[in-house]
Amino acid sequence: MLFPQNISKSGEWVDRLFYLGLILTSIAFVLVIATLIYFLIRYRCQANQKAYYTHGDSKKAIGLTLALAIIVFFAIDINLAVHDHFAWEEIWGRATNAKNPLQIEVMPEQFAWNIRYAGNDGIFGTADDVATINEMHIPVNRPINVALKSKDVIHSFFIPNFRIKQDAVPGLVTYLSFQAVQTGQFDIACAEHCGLGHYRMRGQLTVEDEAAWQKWLAEKSDENTGTENWGWQWEAASRESN
Ligand SMILES: [Cu+2]
């Protein structure tokens, strides 16, 4: 209800984690404020009552503080950490075990998204590569692996409808995986304040069925758009960054 429509296979895991955190911290907030108000009223200034001074270091006070800290730590922190672990497993486990993933290279610069596909031969850095600017097309229901490397400053590749965000850093290749469950047009945004034109660093993601995507790729391939030489080999790139 708070977010744009989720069309990612793993997106609900991120949403669930967010709502769990929101609910848990809201409960804690209400309890703390209610207790505070109760004590304000219960121990307000009254006639014939002498102020009572304490350092709060009695055994009872220390025990209560410790007990509360442990309850909060397990109910919120550990609870979130466990759920986070399963969400992470889901998202990255899916990415690692993905069958026949489509690999896309994204190189942001001030202030645009350079996007590259390997073309029909499946190898980057060859003549049939397809390169576009601010325009990403992906087939629905197929795992997508994106490798990012920035041309200039730090950017962040963000697709709100997929609940994913990954920094793009100069000199370093970072990775991102997702899978669409629905077709449509969605925004790609930069989530890192990267300069004066940051606000207009906007790309468009088109999710379409496999046939339409193949057709688009073939058309782009014919245009011979991939001649600009900025692609990198995935294997070489990961070795280089290690
Ligand atoms: Cu940017």
Image: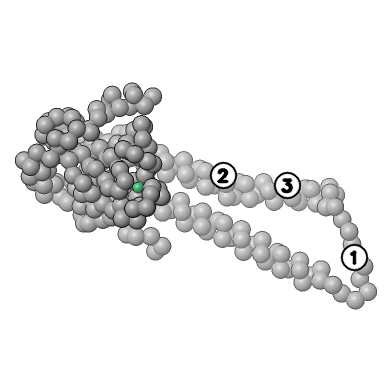
Q: Amino acid at mark 3?
A: Leu
Q: Nearer the viewer, residue 123 or 142?
A: 123
Residue placed under numbered mark 3 in the picture? 66
Q: Amino acid at mark 1?
A: Ala
Q: Secondary structure at mark 2?
A: helix
Whether residue 2 is visible: yes
Residue placed under numbered mark 1 in the picture? 51
Label 1, residues with CA under 10 Å away: few <14, some 14-19, many ≥20: few
Report the quarter where the N terminus lies: bottom left
Proximity of marks 2 and 3: CB atoms separated by less than 8 Å: no
Report the quarter where the C terminus lies: top left
Q: CA distance from mark 1 to mark 2?
A: 39 Å
Identified at 11% across, 47% down, the residue is 216
Residue placed under numbered mark 2 in the picture? 78
Identified at 31% across, 38% down, the residue is 151
Residue 27: mark in rendering: none
Label 2, residues with CA under 10 Å away: few <14, some 14-19, many ≥20: few
Q: x, y percentage for residue 146?
A: 28, 39
Proximity of marks 1 and 2: CB atoms separated by less than 8 Å: no
Q: x, y percentage for residue 190?
A: 35, 50
Q: Name the side, left or right, on which 241 lies relative to 47.
A: left
Q: Nearer the viewer, mark 1 or mark 2?
A: 1
Q: Nearer the viewer, mark 3 or mark 1?
A: 1
Identified at 85% across, 52% down, the residue is 55
Identified at 76% across, 51% down, the residue is 64
